[in-house]
Image (spheres, grey):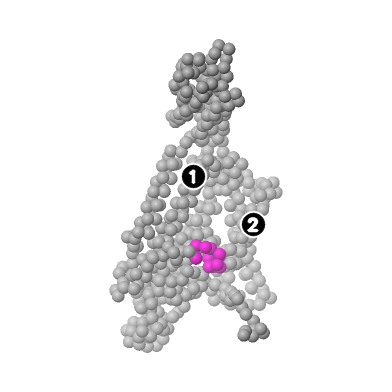
Amino acid sequence: MTDSSQEIQLYAKRAAVVPRSIRGAFRTFKTGVLWLGFLIYFGLPWLPWSRPNAPSQSVLFDIPGRRFLIFDLTIHPQDIFLLSLLLFIAAAVLFFSTALVGRAFCGYFCFQTLWTDAFIWLEHFIQGERPQRLKLAREPWRNRDKLLKVGLTRLAWLLVAFWTAMTFVLYFGHAPDLTTRFFTGQAPAAAYITVAALTLTTYIAAGLMREHVCIFICPYGRFQSAMYDPETLTVHYDRRRGEGTQGRKMARTGLRTLAERAAAGHGDCIDCGLCVQVCPVGIDIRDGLQYKCISCGLCVDACDSIMDKMGWSHGLVRYDSETNLNRDQPAKVGLDWKRLKVAGWGLAVLLSVGWFAWSLGHKATFEHSVQQVRQPLFVTLSDGSIRNRYQIRLTNLSGADQTYTLGARGLPEGALDLGNFERVTIKNEKSVVIQASVMLSPADAARIQAFDFVIRSGAGDEVIDTASFFTRRN
């Protein structure tokens, strides 16, 4: 039986991860992606883009107008297929890249990674390198230096979180106008609620929870193993080279050269722990492949820097595949494209991107509908002629004012009456409803059961819509 007086801990106390900064190729790439991502996210709402009948903003999600404006592209609710296809492309690219290079998306492009990286940089800038931050964490809160530096850090995080949330809101309104109204208290309540909620969640996720979002909340880290193959390229520790026969050992006297270490049975790993110190999720890559690893490559930079100091070759920690690592003589590291999974996802990406591009190129410049007026379905006039009435609805989606010509095919001359709307000019994003009637003699009505409405736009687009003509026999 369990001693009731013994305290049972279901969860281990969290040990804060305090990453050390490092220089190297992967750190440079991560920093480049960070700045590019921030430039795009924070800059797009302020990038002017001239368009008629809409704010001059490059990207605008116009909810009241029920349209998404993305540069010269306008997406309406009826274009939901394009948005669905875009989401499929994003998922297919993610699965394709995972099969090739593991969790590279997590390591370089994920929003959580980017914002956490920025928050860690601010922390490093204000509080110093890892030893200084660890020392500061051990200081009591009555320490003035700790209060000042930690307070400035949290304030900087809060400002970044606030502007992140504010920028998100600016995508849903004209940025200059909405910013002015926001800070003068004239913005809609939804803007203030959204900014408050996103500021709080960004601050918590990137500043406080950090790696816990990747480890415990994000589902991708849990199911990614289903997309891994032995040929998948990801960060690995070369255990045979690093451990030798006697395990890793620090570079002390008598163990400072490769020959001395080989004679003693020790591998190239000098157990400096730098790969653990730079890891943003706090794992030891030497323990093998782990679901917590986000494949950011910082441990590769750390290990390579140590190998440079020792005068040894790079690659003790590197991007490689399990298949290549397990060979007696590992080959040169490279992407393995010749796999059914990779080929399948690659083909899916190519086909969906091609279909998306074709759909954009053939996107309708206007919408139309022709409906029969059914009350009454037809009218018999005093001379025996039969009249049907139709309602034609046109919506201009071309991005500019457009003139449309309406006509009919398969009817006797003069049978179609459009009033004075044979030609109609419609403003961009606007709709008109045109009442049309078709009157046929008894003889023509007996032989004509259907005809075509022909609608042509000034841009050269043409649609043909078949309509039925009803009489008593129908």
Name the foreground residue: 20 vs 152: 20
228 relative position to 182: left or right: left
N-term-proximal mark, 2 vs 1: 1
Image depth: mark 2 or mark 1 in front: 1
State whether residue 303 appears in this view: yes
138 relative position to 403: left or right: right
Q: Position of residue 141 (x, y in %)?
A: 67, 75
Q: Which residue is mark 2?
A: 197
**What is the secondary structure assignment of the residue under circle 2?**
helix
Q: Residue at x 51, y 70 (%)?
A: 281
Q: Callout 1 environment at 10 Å: few (<14), some (14 to 19), or many (20+)? A: few
Tally of numbered tags: 2
From the image, which quarter does the N terminus lie in? Answer: bottom right
Q: Which mark is residue 81?
A: 1
Q: CA distance from mark 2 to mark 1?
A: 30 Å
Vertical placement of 474 versus 307: above or below? above
What residue occupies the far right of the structure in this picture?
Answer: 185
What residue occupies the far top of the structure in this picture?
Answer: 383
State whether residue 308 appears in this view: no
The magenta region covers 211-222
Q: Position of residue 393 (x, y in %)?
A: 55, 30
Say if the magenta span includes residue 251: no
Vertical placement of 199 versus 84: above or below? below
Vertical placement of 241 versus 201: above or below? below
The amino acid type, in three-letter code, at marker 1 is Phe
Q: Residue at x 44, y 41 (%)?
A: 360
Q: Callout 2 environment at 10 Å: few (<14), some (14 to 19), or many (20+)? A: few
